[in-house]
Every structure is written in C-alpha cells, then in structure tokens.
Amino acid sequence: MTDDTHLGLPVGDHDMSHGTQVTSVRSFDHGGKAVEIAATYEVKVNGVARQLHFSVGQDGKVTSHLRPYVAYDSLVDMVKDIIDHYPDDFGPAPQGGHGDHHGHGG
C-alpha cells in the first residue's frame, strides 16, 4: 500500500523558473477583436508560497495534476480540496492565523 498523504511539494523561494507563480493566458475572439487575458497566480498557505501544479482552462475550470480526475469551478475550491487530501504537506496553521476569509470578489 502506498502513502499518498504526502506530496513533497516545493515551498516558497524554490527556483521560481519552476516556481510558485503560475501564469494563465486565455484568448478568444469577440466582435472581430482578438482578446487575451493573462493572470498570474501565487498560492500561499500559512504565508508560504506553494507550487500546486495547476492550470486554468479556456472555460475557466481549474485542474491540477495533484488531483488529476477533478476539475474545479475555482482556484479556491482546488486549494481547499488539496489541503483536505494532503493536510500533512501544509503544516499547522500559525497562531492567530487568517481564518476563512470571505469577500474580495467572486
């Protein structure tokens, strides 16, 4: 039996060329115009930047090879699911942690 509760995920200050920032580019044509939307994401857990190996598709769905058979409606849903499945990779919450924030848009 294999232990799939530990991912060995790289943490912040890891080589940024393989690093913790992910840029997603979505492009489409609309009304005869070529549109390109680029967004750069960095996921931090307990203040530590983490590489969660994810991508955002043209349809906005988020996938990660850490959970290859799941497509998420949002990056927030993906991060919560990965933390739930691999809690030992993220360590305990810091004292006086940030809690479950809401707001900041959709």
Image: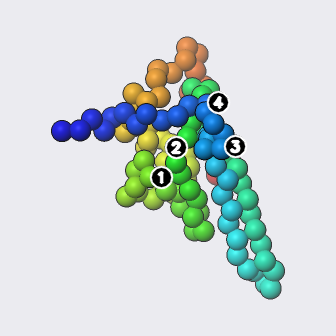
Work out how far the residue at label 4 is from the one at label 3, CA to CA, in angstroms. 26 Å
The residue beneath circle 3 is 104
Work out how far the residue at label 3 is from the one at label 1, CA to CA, in angstroms. 23 Å
Residue 30's x, y, as percent? 75, 80
Residue 101 visible in image:
no
* Vertical order, 106 against 26 (above or below): above
What crowding class fits label 4: few (fewer than 14 Cα within 10 Å), some (14-19), or many (20 or more)? Answer: few
Name the side, left or right, on which 94 lies relative to 81. right
Of the two numbered discs 1 and 2 on the same chain, state the one appearing first in sequence. Answer: 2
Q: Amino acid at mark 3?
A: His
Residue drawn at (52%, 48%) of the image: 53
Name the side, left or right, on which 73 lies relative to 86. right
Residue 44's x, y, as percent? 60, 34
The residue beneath circle 4 is 13
Residue drawn at (73%, 59%) of the image: 38
Work out how far the residue at label 3 is from the one at label 2, CA to CA, in angstroms. 22 Å
What crowding class fits label 3: few (fewer than 14 Cα within 10 Å), some (14-19), or many (20 or more)? Answer: few
- Quadrant containing the N terminus is top left
Residue 34 visible in image:
yes
73 and 19: which is toward the camera: 19
Mark 4 or 1, closer to the camera: 4
Of the two numbered discs 2 and 4 on the same chain, state the one appearing first in sequence. Answer: 4
Work out how far the residue at label 1 is from the one at label 2, CA to CA, in angstroms. 7 Å
The residue beneath circle 2 is 52
Q: Amino acid at mark 2?
A: Leu
Asked if the residue under mark 1 is in contact with the one under mark 4, i.e. CB atoms within 8 Å, the reply is: no
Q: Amino acid at mark 1?
A: Ser
Of the two numbered discs 4 and 1 on the same chain, state the one appearing first in sequence. Answer: 4
Helix, strand or loop for disc 2:
loop
Q: Amino acid at mark 4?
A: Asp
